[in-house]
Each structure stands twice: as C-alpha cells, then as structure tokens.
Image (spheres, rainbow, N blue to C red):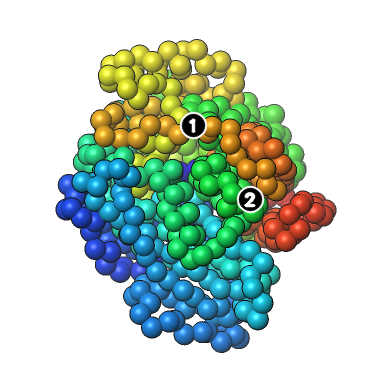
Amino acid sequence: MTWTSALLALSAGISIGVTPPATPAPTPPTPAPVVQQAPLHPGLVPFPFPQPTGPFTSSAPPETAKTTPPLAPGSPEWCKPLPGHRVECGTMTRPLVVGKPQLGTIDVAYTLVRRSDEASPPKNTIVVNPGGPGGAAIAGAQFFVNLIGSLGTDHDLLLIDPRGVGYSSPVTCGLDIKDIYLAADRPRQRRLIGQCGTALGPRAEGYTSAATADDFDAVRRLLGIDKVVLYGLSYGTYLMPIYAERHPDTVKSIVLSGAYPVAFDSLGGPSARAISLSLKRVCERSGACDGRAAIRDLRRVTATLRANPIDVPYTVNGEPRTAKLTEHVLATSLTYDASGGVGAFPDEVLLIGRMPALLHKAARGDTGPLVEWYSATFQAIAQESGDVGLSTTVICNDYARAWSVDAPLRKRYRQYDRAVDRADPGEFGAFSPEAFGASLPDGGDACIEWPKDGTARPYVLQGKLPHVPTLVLSGDLDNNTPDENGRLNAGQFLRARFLSVPNTGHVPELDSTGCAQSIVVGFVRAERLGDTSCLASIPAVKVNPVP
C-alpha cells in the first residue's frame, strides 16, 4: 500500500524488475522551486512489488521473435521501443496547483503502447497505475504489456508516470527510504516526515491523488481517447476510484488488485487481523504447523517485544550499528514484507513460510534465528537508496488520519492518543493498537508532524462513482491489503464483484499459475466475471515445518 512495499524484495531475497535508467530529470518547473527536482534514482523501483519469473514475466518472452517498430522522430530521449508494439511517448505541461500559477508547472510523461494488431481500431485503452504512492509506470512498460496478456493484441495500453515520480518532474524532499525504515523509534520517523513537508513548503499541495487523476484525464484528452479501462494495483486501487469519481463519463470498466478503500482504517485494524489469519491459513494448507499454535506464539513474541525490545546488529560501511526489534517493527514486517511475492515463487520458502518456525523458537526463548533474519534485512536496507518524497507527500496530503489536519501539533497528539485509547484491543489480533498504529508508514501517527499550511487535506469520496463493471481482487494471504479491505473497496461501487485469490499475496496477478491474470483478461473482454475454477489450481505456499 506504500513505498514500504518496495523493500519486499530485500527481505525475501527477490530481485525487483525493471529499474528506471539514470537519465537526467526533466527541466525543473518554473519559477525555481524551494526544493530542487531530483534526478531519476536508479535504486528506486518503478513499482512497489516483486516481479516473478512466471507466466507473463518470462525472462525470454515470445516478443523476442517479433519485430520492434521504430520510434517516431522527435520522441523523448527516455522513450523506449517495445517488441511487437508501436510506441508513442510525450509530455504535457500541467499546473502544479490549479489557481496558483506562482507555484509553477510540472511536466507529465506518458507512453502509449499501441495494440499489436493495428488493422482495426482498439477495442479499448487500458490505463494502468502500478501502486506506491510513488510507483512509475513507464519504466515497467514491458512488464505491463506482459501483464495484460492477450489484451495487447487489440487494446492500447496507456502508461502515465504520476506527477513527481519517474519521468514526470520527479521531486524530492531529501527523505530516503532507509532513513525511515531504519528509524525504529517512531518519534524520529515522525520528525523526518515532518521535515519533508517543511522542505517542500507550499509546493507540497500539488502532489495529491486528485491532481494525479486530473493529469491522467488531461493526457487522455490530449490523445483523443474517448473512454478508458482503469487498472489499479495496490495504491492504484486508491487512485483509480478518485479518477472515476472526478471523471465518471470517461470510464468503461475498472479492475482493482491488492485493494483498499479511500476511507480506510488509519490504525490498520484489517491488516492486524489478517496477520493471524494468514498464519493460520499457511499452517493448515501446508500441514507444516498448527495454525492456532502459531497465533499463540505470535502473541507471546509481541508481548515479549512490548516489554523488552531486542537489539539487532548490522553494519554500515564496515561500522557496527544497532537497530531495535520492537513490537511495531515486527508488525511492519508481517504486514508488508510477509505479503511480498506470495504465490509467485512456489518453489521458495518466503517470509510468510518461515515465520511460524521463527515465532515458535522465539516464543520459547530462542530469538537467535529471528534476530538473524532482521540483521540481514537491516543490512540490505542500509545498502539501498531510494527517494520517498513523492510517496510521503501523497500519503500525508491524502490519507485518512485520526486527528484534525488544522489542529495545532499538541492537540493533534491528544486527538491521536484518544483514538488509540478508544480502539478495541481485540480488533488488532496479536498486537496492541498503539504498536500497530506505530508500525504503519502510511497510517497511525506517521504524518502527525506534517505542516498544515500550504498542504492539501485528506480526500473524501462524494459517492458519485460511475456504475460500470468493476472487479476487485485480493490475495487471501495479503496482510498489506487484505480481503477485508478489498471488500470495503468493492463496496464503494454499485456494480463491483469481489474475488479473493487463494495462496497469493500482494498482488494476486503474480501467482505462478497465471490464473488471476487470466481472470482479469477475461473480465476486461467480457465486462463480467467469468470462469474462476482455476483458483483451485494455485498451490499452497511452502512452509518450514514446526516441530
């Protein structure tokens, strides 16, 4: 659901796919901003989930046998050709904040991937958002061509980098992902995030989901496209409903995968509950452990960490460092890291499959294996780099929160503390409401020090979503955007069908069998949910046995 997902590959030992080339950033907007535009960061992934080598991401795709149409003269330097598809690229200039010309403009970049069979007009144009916030679509063009499968024969694919990321005038506030992820003490996280907002100043107001949705529509109009199929992954399931409400007459159908509602629980209750359910499911389906015992072990470990956090050693440039393994750090890992790649790598034991045995040992006093895993994870994070300015700004502008944005800081803290005190501890699984709220980089009190002046306010749907065919999918082992949130997302629409995809995490289309992908392709073609019997063929994830 957030940029934290970009670290899934680190914790699971997975290589994330296409990375944007180190191309100079577009010309900075005018007038000169307080914060300079950042160059494209080669370490920042274009979309926030692992890419498997599977049915639609083969390392040797069939397109290699196809011709590669040349780019049109005058194409932007960053525009890349694709085998079997004609590609058109461009940028359009947009106001940073409508009605405030003094804040300047930005360039919004797009790539239109034409259908492989251009003998007939396109049946539809699919607009994809890969998630984040902060995921860039253009650098992952081949991934998305593979993702839509046979739809690429007669559907055009429109990829737009959201404002502030990728090739759309990338912005930075000096906030690096490792600074947040390694700041196990929540006060420092809050302080760093607040400093990001202060650095951006009044320009922060320009980086919202509503503004991005309006950019998408402006590109649609520029290209003369009548209606579009919206396809949102992860954060895209938040963004696309906002687009649909603001531009309802332009929407043909909608697919939302790894979904959560616009008005989600900012304390993360659905994710907290999903963690226990996922442990139970992987144990029962694999036969490698007792699900109820795994949940009891989790409760024992969280109680221990609540009272006595554990020091975790790692090194930076050869110098020893220490991070704290706390209850909220464990919650972060089980929410995000444990959801990554699930279903995509059937022959590997990912974190969700390792965790029952790790918790079993830790609950009995042997924390060594758990500390070893965290030490390796912190070590990997310390060696990475990726700017999260855009992600943080969208989160702190748009997302629901448990305090008034207009309240002074001290009052915000009082309002947040009251919300935590009123939360039912029984609704947070094995975790305390306080710790789980502190585990969320896109919720809890993460943005509580974000400045109120010159920034946007949380987005609220007005109940004007179009009545179009809508499919919402969730992986039933996804603690990041669990089934509960997927159902709430579907409930925003009158014509939505919700589908829980077994033995998959974040996001379902990455399953190794290609089942979820085929269901999406069929839905876009027929505008209704078709045969789902292939769900039964998705194998259970591998789990290390617990004695």
Q: Quadrant of residue 275?
A: top right
Question: In the image, is residue 524 above or below residue 122?
Answer: above
Horizontally, residue 458 falls left or right of residue 234, namely left
Is residue 2 something that shows in the picture? yes
Q: Please state which of residues 132 and 209 is positioned toward the viewer in this rendering.
A: 209
Q: Quadrant of residue 153?
A: bottom right
Query: Which of marks 2 and 1 precedes in the sequence?
Result: 2
Horizontally, residue 196 falls left or right of residue 296, namely left
**Image location (x, y in percent) of residue 429:** 59, 25
Q: Please state which of residues 73 and 344 is positioned toward the viewer in this rendering.
A: 73
Q: Please state which of residues 429 and 409 is positioned toward the viewer in this rendering.
A: 409
**Image location (x, y in percent) of residue 171:** 29, 52
Q: Which residue is mark 1?
A: 460
**Image location (x, y in percent) of residue 410:** 28, 16
Q: Residue at x 46, y 74 (%)?
A: 88
For numbered disc 2, what is the local secondary structure? strand
Question: In the image, is residue 494 above or below residue 20?
Answer: above
Horizontally, residue 32 falls left or right of residue 55, namely left
